[in-house]
Image (spheres, coloured by chain):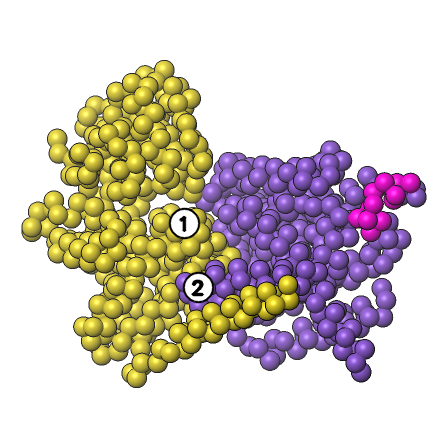
Chain colours: A purple, B yellow
Amino acid sequence: MDKKNSLTLLILTVCLVVFPFIVTNTYYISTMVFVGINGIIAIGLSLLMGCAGQISIGHAAFFGLGAYTSAVLTAKLGFHPWCAFFLGILLSSCIALIIGIPSLKLKGHYLAMATLGFGEITYIVFNELTDITGGPSGIGGIPKIYLAGYAMNTDIKYYFFVWAFLLLILTLSLNLIHSRIGRALRSIHDSEVAANAMGVNTSKLKIQVFMISAVFGSVAGSLYTHYVTFVSPSSFGLFFSILLVMMVVIGGMHSVWGALIGAALLTILPEFLRALKDFEIFVYGAVLLLIMIFLPRGLIGGLEYLFNRLIKKV
Amino acid sequence: MVKRKLLILGVVLLLGLALSVNGFAKKAEVKEPYKIGCLFAFTGPASWLGEPERRTAVWIEDKINKAGGINGHPLKLLIEDTKGDPTAAVLAAKKLLKEGVVAIVGPSTSGESMAVVPIMEEAEQILVSCAAAEAIVHDPKTDTERKWIFKTPQKDSHVVQRIYGHMKKSGITKVAIITDTTGFGAQGREQLKKYAPEFGITVILDETYGPKDTDLTPQLTKIKGTEAQAIVNWSILPAQTTVMKNRIQLGITIPLYQSHGFGNTKYAAAAGEAAEGVIFPCGRVLVAEFLDKKHPQKKLLVEYKKAYESQHKEDVSTFGGHALDALNLVVAALKASGPDKNKMRSFIENKKGFVGTGGIFNFSPTDHTGLGLDSLEMLTVKKGKFDLYKK
């Protein structure tokens, strides 16, 4: 990881630690918890989309797999939450492997369709496997998760818990991108044929990055489950998958920071716009439209542009 | 190109300003108002539930304030959209609690309600849900009613008992059930299977269908091939009318029972002639004008129905009624005991003979729904209109 990224990470950490002491309203804290959860999946998706250039319109499925594994194992079978947490990761990565081998051979729209299909199938399974998933009525009464003997039972505790995970995942991702593997992934993004010719094992790398992003999705899912303590299929449908893609695109595809900014914007904006009542959806759409018209490289692209101009002037 | 971009930007900014001015123009009321939070899904896939609920809430707020408020305090409803999404409902509930509401009414769907229940229990604040699932008020783990949670829609199990009771009288012992795959359908399916033995009825076929299905002849052909004496179609989706139409097309003549999810004039209209003669238990909102003059619910129902239909040019549904009952209940509690959540809770828990659109509510510590079997009326469709079933 280079200096610029380390510095930004440090600033982010400081801001995050200070935030709950300035803003004590638990509603804002809890919005930030969801920003963190969505951020984790978006970072994973950004590795897949922005870095390796592979699209997935079914990422809500991995989020759901993590969430349901945690929910079913802890609420119904009495597993330890951490045990369920890791089993969720295991399950998601196995499924990502099985799905990834055939589907990542596809390109462009076809890959989009395949992942879309996977997302829909998972959604149907959540709905129809009533005996295990509780069907459309969902599963309630999920226990809280414990960390070193402390229950994560308040918004503030959970806020730190989730953002600690996010920082960990962000650091991992930044390191990955700036490693040999990261460069290989970016070469796939630019030209798969050229990457192959240079001796990069593209099919293996694509599956690996798909699995990593599935794991991040599963982590976010388990964190969601133990926070809301209720899961039902409607949280893991096509709309959420599309929202995730939007987070990555709006934030800026070429950087994981973009995914985080996109997740923050698309989670906070609807809450912020609540005051507008009926016009909410209209303004929401307008904001997204304006970003895409004026900042085709996403929010992070715009920020970088401004920053560079500022430096030039100084 | 740059000019055009600037033009777009300008137009959008101006529109935004116009909206925000509109938002700030309203002045706060002088006397301290009582705040009640409302969570309704008035956009998204459950908006057909949330929109009538919101309209009803706005109507009752206006009505109460015009009549001088609650003990002189104006009523202020903080209505939030949940979009049919549990996550959005959780955030909206936290927002409302922070804004100091004395109680929350809603959410519209069972899934959202289940997500909001833990928050309300932790905060020890009253929630009166507008969704049907019994798990909302009843904790299956401890087999007790949840302390702070109430709901106003009729129980699914009561609907099932009314249907089976009617069948028993008509000498029906073998039924085929066909349910949708939403939460509503899944709950109904569970209850239909659970209560069948109690009424000496056997479910000989159990079929389901999805929200987007447009042809249900395969399921119905299967049913036709059995010895079923009646069909129960349990759904809250528009697809339920397909069952009715396909049944006529296949020449199936055994009686068709519907759930209370059919209680929407749009569905009766969509099914057309195929809906004639179906039997279903439902609250009395739909047949307000046919009720006996002395019926305790008559006055409330007729007033609500007239006000709703003249204001919105749309037929009244039972769903808006659930919100009306929930709000009236909280308002009654406020009137009786002021904004003290503990007193309000025990007022609601011990309230007897409360007249609502869903029936006469008799709450108790062991029953946070408060409605009995008599809250439902057997209805039918006659010439495209809902009517009382008489036989």
Q: Are marks 1 and 2 on the same chain?
A: no
Residue A22: image location, x then y, percent: 60, 80
| The quadrant where residue B26 appears | bottom left
Find numbered disc 2 in the image and state the secondary structure of the residue it sits on: helix
Q: Quadrant of residue A106?
A: top right
Q: Chain of mark 2?
A: A
Residue A253: quadrant of the picture: bottom right
Give the vertical position of A232 relative to B185 (above or below). below
Q: Residues within 10 Å of mark 2 (few under 14, many from 20)?
A: few
The residue lying at 47 percent from left, 74 percent from top is B17
Q: Nearer the viewer, residue A150 or A294?
A: A294
Q: Position of residue B229 (x, y in %)?
A: 27, 21
Numbered disc in front, either 1 or 2: 2
Mark 1, Cα crowd under 10 Å, few <14 / some 14-19 / many 20+, is: some
Query: What residue is drawn where x is 23% and y is 73%?
Result: B65
x, y (%) of residue A63? 62, 49
**Element assignment for label 1:** loop
Q: Residue furthest left?
A: B293
In the displayed structure image, the side of residue B77 where residue A302 appears, left or right: right
Viewer-proximal residue, A8 or B224? A8
Residue A279: numbered disc: 2
Residue type pointed to by label 1: Ala
The disc at residue B368 is none
Name the residue located 66 percent from the left edge and 49 percent from the top edge: A218
Q: Is residue A63 above or below residue B170?
A: below
Q: Is residue A148 left or right of residue A72?
A: right
Q: State the residue position of label 1.
A: B46
Q: In the image, is B280 to the left or to the right of B288?
A: right
Is residue A312 positioned above or below B95 on the image?
below
Asked whether A217 falls inside the magenta stretch, the response is no
* Magenta range: A186-197
Residue type, numbered disc 2? Phe
